[in-house]
Amino acid sequence: MASQSKMRTLILVGALSLHAIFEGLVFGLSSGEVGDILGTMSAVLIHKSIIAFSTGMQLVSSEIEVS
């Protein structure tokens, strides 16, 4: 069961890394106008906050032992 937990963790890290790459592409492909960049930054900030909260809640509810 420990190997399954490690595999799930690796998949999660890989998925979040791929997600971050796509978020970086959004900034790279933006038009460069200040209003567009600020709107994109605020959307990504809200999005990241929600992801961080839900990931933290998932970790707390999983009751993983800290060693």
Image: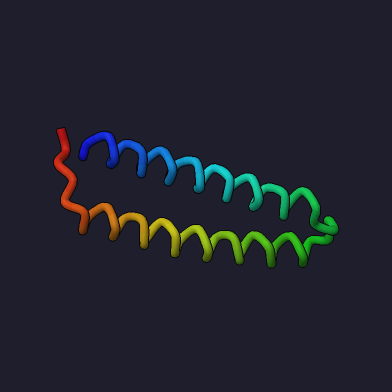
Q: Residue at x 14, y 41 (%)?
A: 65
The C terminus sits in image quarter? top left
Which residue is more in the foreground, 23 or 14?
Answer: 14
Residue 15 rendering spot, x and y as whole percentages? 51, 47
Give the answer, above or below, for where 15 lies relative to 40: above
Residue 28 rendering spot, x and y as whole percentages? 77, 48
Which residue is more in the foreground, 33 or 1?
Answer: 1
Q: How is the image coloured?
A: rainbow
The N terminus sits in image quarter? top left
Give the answer, above or below, for where 3 lies relative to 8: above
Q: Residue at x 83, y 61 (%)?
A: 33
Give the answer, above or below, for where 18 lies relative to 61: above
Query: Would residue 2 appear left or right of 13 to someone viewing this image?
Result: left
Give the answer, above or below, for where 35 lies relative to 20: below
Query: Would residue 25 appear left or right of 66 to someone viewing this image?
Result: right
Which residue is more in the foreground, 47 or 38?
Answer: 47
Which residue is more in the foreground, 35 or 49?
Answer: 49
Q: Residue at x 50, y 58 (%)?
A: 48
Quarter where residue 61 is shown: bottom left
Residue 50 rendering spot, x and y as whole percentages? 44, 64
Tally of numbered tags: 0
Residue 57 rendering spot, x and y as whole percentages? 28, 60
